[in-house]
Image (cartoon, rainbow, N blue to C red):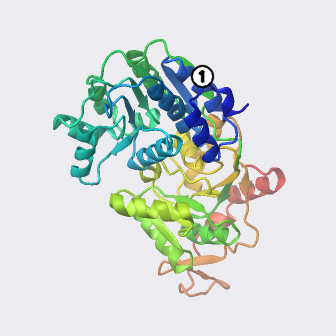
Amino acid sequence: MTFTQFPLNERLQRAIVEAGYLEPTPIQAEAIPIVLTGSDLLGTAQTGTGKTAAYVLPLLHLLMSNPREARKTRALVLTPTRELAEQVRATIKALGRHTTVRATTVYGGVGMAAQDRALRNGTEIIVACPGRLLDHATRGAVDFSGIECLVLDEADRMLDMGFLPDIKRIINLLPRERQTLLFGATFAPELDRFAAQIMTTPARIAVGESAPATTIAHAIYMVPAQLKTTLLIALLEGITSESVLIFTHTKDRADMVAKSLTRAGYHADVMHSNRTQQQRQHTLDAFRAGTIPYLVATDIAARGIDVSTVSHVINFDIPETADTYIHRIGRTGRATRSGEAFTLVTRDDYDIIRLIERSLGERLPSNVLEGFDYQQTVTGGSPTLVRGRAAANGGRAHAGQAYLSSPAYQAIIASVRQTGSV
């Protein structure tokens, strides 16, 4: 199948070719014809399968096919993070390059003045985070009366992040007669109930629901907690591609990991909510350009990182849910590219691994990094070799020694070597 089989405007077809799109992904092949009919749609697809273009292309076509008052806002896209908002705007700009359709992004972390001017001057599409959009609405800067289409992108994540009350307030400001599109990687019962309240007989499509892209190879690495940073650096030594995204639970952990990588000679930077929007955008641009090969991020900051060249995602800290695992590793293996996802696992993480495996319906392969020296201790924050029972730590047993010699760990290693899984 090719994009020429869709009844899209010729100017959009030109932009598709220029953007390098070769053939529709499964979510695009199913969603585009439905959106073109004007129907409501619930779309479920794993991260990295091209769902942004799946709604941007037909949305641009519909706006071009039915001209209205110039610069009147006709479509609203809500996203959970500013990075995803910028990703959506970039897609609209690329695919709408031969049109007069304009999009404006609205999110917090930056001044309101420039956004206020753009909204008051008029824009056909607003791509926004809910909280900042409501700030502008209360100031009278947004005219919702002409909205014909509402898109909730990563709707599942917006609910997880507590945006539901803000989304409901925004929806109450919109015309009742409109097209509504909801996209997410998963759809919990709460989201289905919410969709039933705001949509009219929506079509439902699910592509690879609750599963990561098939282009991703998984591996988990057992390691004592004290040696996680050492193992991370050892893993990076074996990765020839220089586009690696590393996840941590907290901002402090992200800073710590980035500093450790820098000390080890790796050009790394961080993405988390303590950084300004300007800093985050600069870092993301540098990561996309390859001048920063290693990016350490928290989950919230990583939403919307759409960098097609990411070859590896490494979970320095294991995600807390299967859905988060899917979202994280979906940053690699995007569209038809292949990628690898490594997860560092301590003995405290076994229960979460089981939950992830049950959700995915398969075992996560476990690897042992050959040549990695577990005979180490952590002294003053740095790993050092231990030779014999007496060493730099005054004869203490080295970090992780009891863990490594325990029957449970040895059984795990034996299982890995024999079967390739935990």
Identify the image quadrant of residue 178. Answer: top left
Near-viewer residue (123 or 297):
123
- Tell me what residue is drawn at x 61 percent, y 71 percent: 233
Dot 1 corresponds to which residue? Answer: 33
| Residue depicted at x 58% and y 27% | 32
Of 121 and 370, nearer the camera is 121
Q: Secondary structure at mark 1?
A: helix
Query: Percent position (x, y) of residue 366?
Result: 72, 53
Q: Nearer the viewer, residue 20 or 307?
A: 20
Q: Is residue 118 left or right of residue 4?
A: left
Rendered position, 253 above or below 299: below
Amino acid of disc 1: Pro
Name above or below for residue 265 compared with residue 296.
below
x, y percentage for residue 60?
A: 48, 32
Q: Residue 332: percent from the left, percent from the top?
A: 62, 51
> If the image is split into quadrants, where does the N terminus sit?
top right
Residue 280 placement, left or right of 24: left
